Image: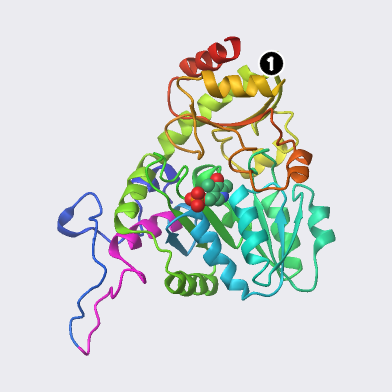
Amino acid sequence: MLEKDTICVHPTRCPHPIHGSITTPIFQAATFVHESVEKESEYSYSRVQNPTRAVLEARVAELENGVDAVAFASGMAAETALMNIFESSGHIIAGDDLYGGSLRLFRYVSSPAGLRFDFTDTTNLENIRAKLRPDTKAVYVETPSNPTMQVTDIAAAAKVAHAAGALLIVDNTFLSPLFQRPLDLGADIVVHSGTKYLGGHNDTLAGFLVTKKPELAEKLRFYAKTVGACLAPFDCFLVERGIKTLAVRLEKQAANAEKIAHWLRERPEVRKVYYIGFPDHPGYEVTKRQCSGFGGMISLEVNTPETAKKILREVRLFQYAESLGGVDSLITYPMLQTHADVPEEERLKRGINDRFLRISVGIENAADLIEDLRAALEK
Ligand SMILES: *Cc1c(COP(=O)(O)O)cnc(C)c1O
């Protein structure tokens, strides 16, 4: 079997492009003409499927070792479609350190629609076990989590969920299938914000749901075509192009992040660095077992709110912007951005205070990035 960095460039499952084109053509069509009353064409209507999207989905499915991947207009569109499979009833146990948008969806959209959620620290499996109920339909984890980089043991969480008849859903946005493949570890559904590492250039939104179970794939496709938040052909083209360089980007981002994390840790202004590649990270053993890289994400707590603001104000290469996973290095202030809608008490309990920053390391030169941070800190 080919390695995943090869699959990024040469997927084996994709239908071959027409006219020998080395790139997938953008089929900018809403509808497709049927051959005859007796014979429908392979494609009928682009909400249901589009040839450009089919190629991208096959590529993502192969990278995650799934049977199928469904592409959506954003990560949140994917998660919203996913919630439909529970048909407005039942109980979901979710991590308590999720992407802020996921928390907002679960709390303010899915809960009023009838689903019941319990949020807990999923790094401790006992917490999951303690929350299980007869009507628990799924356990939803993000690992490493956003933004405090907590690691959940996917294989162990899958066992706990399955023993209770529930699905395990894993948001794999932070590491991508290059560094972590939850389906191989027992997860049932993988969620991606393709906006991040898969797209990789901060130029398009995208989302994916991937599964290795044909019956789940059928359900996901049904809700995708019905809800209609599908990824447009041009955006499919951009994400496919992004995936071709996923392996080289991620390798550089991970190498840069490792250097920056170690450097930050030595700075007197920095109180705590959250990075899964530190041997003293509580999830390090699990990470070594279930991941093949540490990724490009770092969070940190500095000494004062003034230092946090100074960094955001003074950096020149790092840019103060939301999102992550792209070629450009970005810094965010989760308190004001991704986690602005999380109740303050909860946010503070998790350490997301006014001294907390999150860094997405890009592909620039590591020494230049470190110098940028040093100059900002010493300003
Ligand atoms: C960004 C993100 C999402 C949401 O994806 P969008 O593409 O922004 O809708 C979900 N989960 C994680 C971990 C993310 O970082």
Q: Nearer the viewer, residue 101 or 50?
A: 101
Q: Residue at x 56, y 57 (%)?
A: 190
Instruction: Describe residue 186's horizontal placement relative to residue 252 as left or right.
Output: right
Q: Which residues are magenta?
A: 37-61
Q: Going by the picture, which residue comes out furthest to the left? A: 19
Based on the picture, tell me whether residue 42 belongs to the magenta stretch: yes
Residue 111 spot, x, y in % from top left: 68, 66
x and y, in percent, of residue 145 in the image: 65, 44
Q: Does the image show residue 212?
A: no
Rendered image quadrant of residue 281: top right
Magenta span has 149? no
Point 34% across, 49% down: residue: 240
* Residue assigned mark 1: 269
Q: Residue at x 68, y 72 (%)?
A: 114
Q: Is residue 206 left or right of residue 132?
A: left
Q: Position of residue 194 (x, y in %)?
A: 45, 50
Residue reaching furthest to the bottom? 38
Vertical arrangement, residue 63 with respect to residue 90, above or below: above
Q: Is residue 304 above or below residue 282?
A: above
> Is residue 373 visible to us here?
yes
Foreground pick, 239 / 116 = 116
Q: Disc 1 residue type? A: Glu
Measured as percent of width and height from the top left, residue 249 is found at 42, 34
Q: Around disc 1, counting alpha carbons within 10 Å, would you say few (fewer than 14), some (14 to 19), or many (20 or more)?
A: some
Could you tell whether 164 is left or right of 256 in the image? Answer: right
Nearest the viewer among 341 and 150 is: 341
Residue 158 appears in which quarter of the rendering? bottom right
